[in-house]
Amino acid sequence: GCNQSIQFPISQAYAKTRAAELMILKACELYDSNKKCGEEANISKLLSAEVSWLAAEAAMQTFGGFAFAEEYDVERKYREARLYRVAPISTNLVLGYLAEHILGLPRSY
């Protein structure tokens, strides 16, 4: 972590993780208050999935070929991060929800 090529992707993932966390907290606050939280919940899912993928990509780049070695667990985390983009619902479904229900665009599927 002594140079920018390592620091910057980690810092980028950290900042975006904090942003996702704030949206999660907002969604939870609305839910706990029995208010509509569909927008916030869906944005939380989208941001969390995207930032986990960003962090996994940064780890793969940082570790290079060692990222595929079982003893570092980077490859496993990379696969898990990819899973979050498709399960329990696809980020494409989240985008469709936001487009239709929040932005008022026509249904696209």
Image (spheres, rainbow, N blue to C red):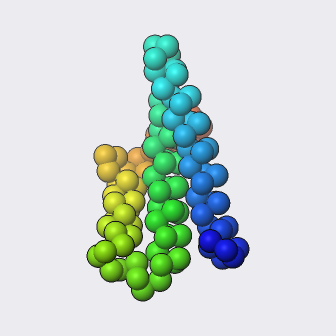
Horizontal arrangement in the rendering, residue 70 relative to residue 21 (left or right): left
Count the labels in the image: 0
Q: Nearer the viewer, residue 9 or 27?
A: 9
Q: Residue at x 67, y 67 (%)?
A: 8
Q: Is residue 78 above or below residue 64?
A: above
**Outermost residue toward the front?**
2
Q: Residue at x 49, y 13 (%)?
A: 33
**Outermost residue toward the top?**
33
Q: Residue at x 29, y 76 (%)?
A: 70
Residue 93: x, y in percent? 41, 47
Q: Nearer the viewer, residue 98 or 76?
A: 76
**Outermost residue toward the bottom?**
65
Q: Is residue 108 visible?
A: no
Q: Residue at x 60, y 45 (%)?
A: 18
Q: Is residue 39 above or below residue 70?
A: above
Which quarter shows the N terminus? bottom right
Q: Nearer the viewer, residue 109 or 23?
A: 23
Residue 42: x, y in percent? 47, 38
Horizontal arrangement in the rendering, residue 11 relative to residue 46 (left or right): right
Q: Is residue 62 visible?
A: yes
Question: Which picture quadrant has residue 104?
Answer: top right
Residue 90: x, y in percent? 37, 51
Residue 77: x, y in percent? 36, 64
Q: Is residue 17 above or below residue 26?
A: below
**Outermost residue toward the right?**
4
